[in-house]
Amino acid sequence: MPAERAGYTVTMFLVDTSPSMGEVRTVELPPGPNGEERTTEITNLEWALRYVKTKVQEMIFNGRKTDQCGVIVFGSDTTDNIINDESEGYESVVEYIPIATPNAGTLAKLDELLPSETTGDPIDALIVGIETQARHLGKKKTWTRKVLLVTDGNSEIETEDWEATVDKMNEYDVKLTVVGVDFDDVEFGYAYENKTSTKRNNEKFFHDIVGRMKDDNGILGTCEHALEEVGRPDTKQVRSALMGTILRLGDPDRDADTAIEIMVKASKATALQRPATMKKFALLQNEDKDDDEDAMEVDEDVEQKAVFAQLKMRTQYYYEPDAPSEEDAVKLEDEEEGLLLDGDDEKKEKKVLQKVEVEKEELIRGFKYGTTYAPCPDGQFPKLPTSKGITICGFFPAENFRRELSMGEIQYIWGDPGSPQQQVAISSFSRAMEADKKMAIARWVSRDGMDPKMGVLVPSNFDKVDCLLWAPMPFADDVRRYTFASLDRLVSKKGELITEHPYIPTEEQCEAMDAFVDSMDLMDAADDEKGNRTQWFNPSEAFNPAIHRIKQAIFHCAVVSDISTTPLPPPHPELTKYFEPPPRTLKRVKKTLPACQQAFGVKQVPKRVGKVKKDDHEHAAEDAESELLLNQKGKAPVRRQSTLLPTPSAVIGSTKFVIKGNDSGSETESDEEGGLLLDAKKPASTLEGKAPPTPARSVSPKTKRSSKRDEEDEDEDIDPGRAPGRIIGSTHPLKDFKKNISQGDVVTKAVEDLSMIVTEILLKPFASRRSDEMLECMKAMRKVCLEEDEVDAWNAFLQNLKTKCLSSKPKGNPGFWEKVREEGRTLSLLTEKEVKKYGGTSQYSEKQAVEFLT
């Protein structure tokens, strides 16, 4: 089936507003924060309109002007349609929304629909909708015509000559979808029992209509299933616009006799899709207030409406001027801190040296080169003289193609559809490359004077047409080649071949790794409908969760009127089915993992947190492509500062101030004023951070944070009692344990170290002083071992501790073990019953755990 033309579709929504649509139903909501079940009550009309509004929102989301829709309401208290205007009949049918491109107003108008007091005939609405659609399109035969009928089937239907209506829809090639409230759906597994005879007969009649539609253009389903399907993630295949260009082999300007030029058309085979971007809004504040006291009074009973405005990005450019002398800097600090000078009782006016703002026109562009910038006075370097077209540079064997380098969008290269000669030429070219198993290196220029792109041309042969596939490739300078020494061949300095070395894998390690990799095979990890083994992951059925979840949230906000009472439902199961690996594969992996751990001696290594060194040098941003530099010799590079500004009013972002002395500088940031200021009354040594701040001075928020860091530094001066290779110290073992557990990936190491620390402390003299602390450590360790599948480690530790505490040697500690017995089962062995709910296993029963303490 060919892909639909993007847009160019007119959809008619026929909505039933009969009195029966006002019946109230209970709809399930997503579980609450604590897993409690929640429900809400809405009318059948509101429930059915969710489907209609979701379909309309999808058109708005796509943003195509050629994707249009209209709404016909039947069962209305009034009559207003094009057929009734010309002749009699077709009562209670209203053209509620004329055919046009939908917008937010369309959704708002659908929200105003309410059940009426008059019943309507869906066949009348169907005829009016088809005629309205036909008159709007006229002779546009390439447009797609769709009709969506939403009803509960409780109104009387005039079935006379309904076959003629269906034949007319077949003539116009209309695609009909009937969505029934509480209709039976065999595929969905839903059957409504308490049906009236009218509803049952009408449902059978709609089945007859759908069955008469040609080419499977008719669909009938229940509303619940329709709401679920409309939320299903989907990749819609559309036709891409054909862009004309020229395929060249050789140089027509130099050797026209041997050069070949083929007129081709290019279209997208794949397109990059990103999640919908979010726009930022901010609450506006009314700063223009009258000085009159009466104007300042606000009636407390009148609720003021919050006004939001969209924020826009604005970029400002600054540079640092010449720094003041040290004497001026110290004087400025005194005035900034509010100290009295020359006996004055009033504070001096603050003088803050700001960065100077410059206009964009005064700057020149600079491109990053290492950690510096190379200025480009003209804004860009001279471009290559290029001409439009795809030029083939050479051919190479297809087996030499490095597939990992192709990571861009793929495009089709077709022969010109209007020229059979060009189609034969591109077909011959493609088949010749296929027969010789070659691929072509090509240079693509989209327009004259544009930068060229390098890529490969791959032959592609379909059933009725031959073409080429274009895949963009990186330039040779952009490819990073990293070479590594051989893993299985090691040579000594003398040139002798070494066969046994820790770096050379053994036969046991290779076999263990082969078994581990083979156990992760996903080609037989799932079952099909017949129970046969099949592949678990199918790329064509995988969807990007970020794209579709954000889209689901946008649609939900547009459809429901209150998010608090109708929260966002959970993601569709199609989005989450690949989140967890298949159980069959996990079971196989667990069997091979211990052999790998034993063969390679795998142990968890704690993460090393490096200290951040202070660096006053300015470097180029790692991800910056280019920057703007001052067009003045000897000035520093410009720093860009971006602020978000509301549309109606201008808001100036926070500005940074820097003051530097002649020989040394210090920066202290003020959170309240957004500036970097020097501390007051500090000599040169203080500015370098060599002297503590004066206690009598007021302390800024930043200085308070510095004091807090000083306290942490003092804590670091205390010996943590951490032996080499351990991550738990004897000084604060519980604190170290919780800190490492919160970081993750070091659970086994943390449990191992804490068990050693507790044992060592309890066997030392005066251990009774830390008995309560050790009990707390054991409680924390037991909980972690239970939840993190370290059951064997806890049981082994407890047995070892009991043996050493009850030892007859002088180093025993029977008093502590008596306290462990008093704690009871909370500090006993982990049993099979306890660890079962966490997915673990234990060799001890509840009876054995009790006997262990007694």
Image: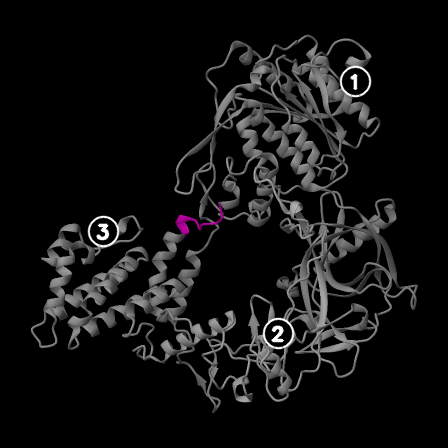
Alpha carbons under labels 3 and 2: distance apart: 53 Å
Determine which residue is flagged by label 1.
82
Determine which residue is flagged by label 2.
481
Q: Residues within 10 Å of mark 1 (few under 14, many from 20)?
A: some
Q: Residues within 10 Å of mark 2 (few under 14, many from 20)?
A: few
Alpha carbons under labels 1 and 2: distance apart: 71 Å
* Majority SS type along the magenta span: loop
Q: Nearer the viewer, mark 3 or mark 2?
A: 3
Residue 845 in view (yes/no): yes
Which image quarter holds the N terminus? top right
Q: x and y percent of residue 692 in the render?
A: 46, 83
Question: From what the image shows, is residue 411 above or below residue 475?
Answer: above
Q: Which mark is residue 672?
A: none
Tell whether position 285 is magenta. no
Is 730 left or right of 523, judged from the image as shown?
left
Residue 744 in view (yes/no): no
Q: x and y percent of residue 656 in the render?
A: 64, 71
- Who's the residue at 63% across and 79% down the image? 659
- Who's the residue at 78% across and 15% down the image? 83
Is 224 left or right of 105, judged from the image as shown?
left
Determine which residue is flagged by label 3.
832
Q: x and y percent of residue 538 in the render?
A: 54, 47
Q: Nearer the viewer, mark 1 or mark 2?
A: 1
Quarter of the image where one finds residue 356: bottom right
Q: Secondary structure at mark 1?
A: helix
The region drawn magenta spans: 577-585
Question: From what the image shows, is residue 636 above or below residue 63?
Answer: below
In the image, what residue type sits under mark 1?
A: Ile
